[in-house]
Every structure is written in C-alpha cells, then in structure tokens.
Amino acid sequence: MQMMQVNQELQKALEELQVVKEKLHQAYEELEQRVTERTAELVMSNVLLQQEIIECQSAEAALRQSENLYRQLVESQTDIIIRIDLQGQITFANVAACQTFGWKQDEFRGQSFFQLLHPDDLPQVMESITALATSYYPLTNCERCALTVKGIRYFQWNAIAIPNDKGEVVEIQQVGRDITEQQAALHDRQLAEAALRQSEEKFRTFSENTHAMIWIASADSFYPLYISPAYEKIWGRSSQRLFEQPKSWVDAVHPDDRDRAT
C-alpha cells in the first residue's frame, strides 16, 4: 500500500517535471524568437544607421562642394560683394572689395559699411537698409559714390536681404559695379549733345534771319536736306515743292546758265 502511494507520488512528480520541461522549452523557444526578432531589429537599425551616415556624409560633401563653388564664384567676381548686418557692420567682403578699398579681408569684418560711401549718399543708403530689413524685395540699380583707393568712384549697387532659419532678415548682401567710366562717357555724350543742339540752334537762328539763301543737299543724290526761308522770298517758290521735286530748282536758273549749273 505504501509502495503504491510512493509510485503515485513519483508519477505525479514526473508529470509535474514534464510540465515544467514543456514550459521551459516553450520559454526557450519564445526567448529564441525574441532574440531572433531583436537581432533582426538591430540589423535593420544598423542598416538604417549606416544609410543615414552615408546620406549625411553625402549631404556634407554636397554642402562643401556648394560652399566651394560659391566661394570660387564670389572670389572670382570683378564686382564688389559685401555683406552687412542690420547695423551696417561688415560681415564679409570679397577680393574685389579688398582691391577696391585697399583693405585685407579680415580687416573688413566689424567695420562700418557707411565709411566707404560718400557722406551725401548716406541718408538714401540708410533708408534702403531699413526698407530691406522689412521686405524681401531686392533693390536694383542704385547709383552711389564710394571712397576707393582711386578716389571717388561711381558704383551701381544691387542689394538683397538674407534671412535666417526663422525667416527673419539678419544680413544684407550688396553687389557693386564700378560705372565711373560709363558715367564719364555718358556725361561727355550729354555735353556733346548739348553742344550740338546749341550749334543747331545758332545755325537755325542765322539761316532764318539772313537774306542769303542757304541750301543743303546730300552729296550723292543732291536731294535737299535743308532750305532756308530766304528761298521763298528770293524766288517766290515753295520750299515744299523743291523737296517734292528736287530738280525743279533748275527752272529758276537762266537758260544760258543751266548747262553750267547742272
């Protein structure tokens, strides 16, 4: 009887042991599954991380290339390029600016942009900076005088606002082109045109008040270009008729002289 009881307990213990083994096996399989899933997640995370690193490196390389291209473009410009903050302090100047004003690039930083300009132009320049600080519209073709190593020179300025990440204007970039020679040529042309107008006026005043007939014709076709009012007074013929029939002047010449006149 006692032996039977022992066997039953033993059987029960074996059954419990089997249950524990099954639970342990199930737990082991679940652990294996979790490890497999976690390993896959780690592998995927590592792949994504590597991809992000590659993309970041590519972006950094593209940024460096873009910066180098921008720097080469800016430094190779013959036009002046100057960037200032909203207080007018210079934050950047290219090589052309150094050559124009006789400063080194590191000497520009922190200097006032206003000291480079003629005092007469300062009110308009300050007004332009204020306008740019509140608007993204560029300012173009603003002519201002600058105090350069060659003396006072005329520059044509184009300016744009530079915003930060929040869209707030923090800097202003200005590109200046020396137009002194063009201005001098324009001034000379204006003087020549004024002298021509004065000469024409003097000629017109003389020709319209003289009793002598003045007739100007083209050298090749002999077509009349100008006929003074004295023509009508002397010959009693219409100037308009002479313009319409250029050879009709022969009618006013004595028949004996027509061969020599023509």
Image (spheres, rainbow, N blue to C red):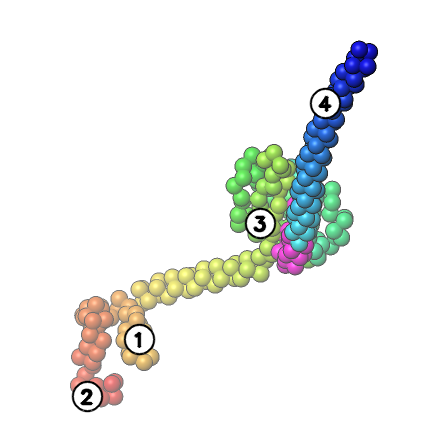
- Camera-near label (4 vs 2) is 4
> Residue 11, located in which quarter of the rendered image?
top right
- Camera-near label (3 vs 1) is 3
Q: CA distance from mark 4 to mark 2?
A: 152 Å
Mark closest to the chain's N terminus, 4 or 2:
4
- Camera-near label (1 vs 2) is 1
Mark closest to the chain's N terminus, 4 or 1:
4
* Residue assigned mark 2: 256
* Residue assigned mark 1: 217
- Camera-near label (4 vs 1) is 4
Mark closest to the chain's N terminus, 3 or 1:
3
* Residue assigned mark 3: 157
* Residue assigned mark 4: 19
Q: CA distance from mark 3 to mark 1?
A: 48 Å
Mark closest to the chain's N terminus, 4 or 3:
4
In-front residue for pair 167/125: 167
Q: Residues within 10 Å of mark 3 (few under 14, many from 20)?
A: some
Where does the magenta region start and end? 66-84
